[in-house]
Image (cartoon, rainbow, N blue to C red):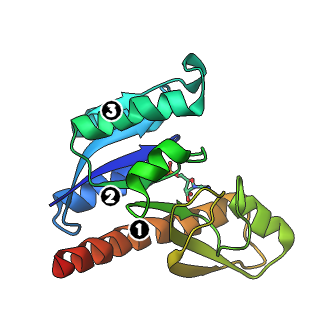
Amino acid sequence: MKRVAIFASGSGSNFQAIVDATRLGELEADVCLLVCDKPDAYVVQRALQSGIPTFAFNPKEYASKQHFELAILEELQKHDIDFIVLAGYMRLIGDTLLHAYGGRMTNIHPSLLPSFPGKDAIWQALHAGVKITGVSIHYVDEGMDTGPIIAQTAVEIDEYDTLQSLEKKVHAVEHALYIHTLQHIFQKERQEV
Ligand code: GAR
């Protein structure tokens, strides 16, 4: 069974959906660690309630990205982590983690990449006036929401959509798509072994 660490910075609805899916047997993986760069984020409470160990850190307390990524790497090794799932981790991954986990790290982004990378992607799509946006899952490289795309689902924007209603539609798609995509990746890897 894959030993997974989830990285998140915010509310953690994707974190929760993934943890629930592992416990329901819909996703064959063990979520063994939460890594969070915002110790006050709600996702930390979720991890506590779900009994998942957390490494929550304040990046400002480290001299550089390399320093805090080395601290993260130590935690990942301590928990014997095979795979990293970024779920709303609002920080670029640096060389230290890329070298250790390149090809074993995915990200979810709330747009049809390569459109609308970066922050506030749902807002960006709404304000660009596009009629279709969506969700992308991709492998992580050194760029911002770049890296090979693994799966995408489209979400229609209708004329009555507000930021709130569109966020709701996008989130509903995110959870199912991330679980399904991870299951597919892990299953494929098991077959290749
Ligand atoms: C999700 O919509 C995710 O796609 C987005 O952050 C949100 C986290 O929600 N990620 C990015 O924008 C990455 N560039 P959550 O904390 O409820 O899972």
Q: Amino acid at mark 2?
A: Ile
In the figure, 163 relative to 113: above or below?
above
- Between the C-alphas of marks 3 and 2, the distance is 23 Å
Mark 1 or mark 3: whose residue is earlier in sequence: 3
Q: Quadrant of residue 85?
A: bottom left
Residue corresponding to mark 2: 18
- Between the C-alphas of marks 1 and 2, the distance is 8 Å
Query: Which is more toward the observer, 32 or 179?
Result: 32
Q: Residue at x 14, y 61 (%)?
A: 1
The answer to whether 51 appears left or right of 150 in the picture is: left
Residue at far top of view: 61
Residue corresponding to mark 3: 74
Position in image of residue 58 (x %, y %): 53, 23
Question: Is the Cβ of the residue at disc 1 closer than 8 Å to that at disc 2?
Answer: yes
Q: Amino acid at mark 3?
A: Glu
Query: Which is more toward the observer, 187 or 160?
Result: 187
Q: Residue at x 70, y 77 (%)?
A: 157
- The secondary element bearing badge 3 is classed as helix
Residue corresponding to mark 1: 178
Q: Quadrant of residue 127?
A: bottom right
Residue at far right of view: 128
- Between the C-alphas of marks 1 and 3, the distance is 26 Å
- The secondary element bearing badge 1 is classed as helix
Residues packed near mark 1 inside 10 Å, few (<14), some (14 to 19) or many (20 plus): many
The answer to whether 26 appears left or right of 6 in the picture is: left
Query: Which is more toward the observer, 40 or 109?
Result: 109
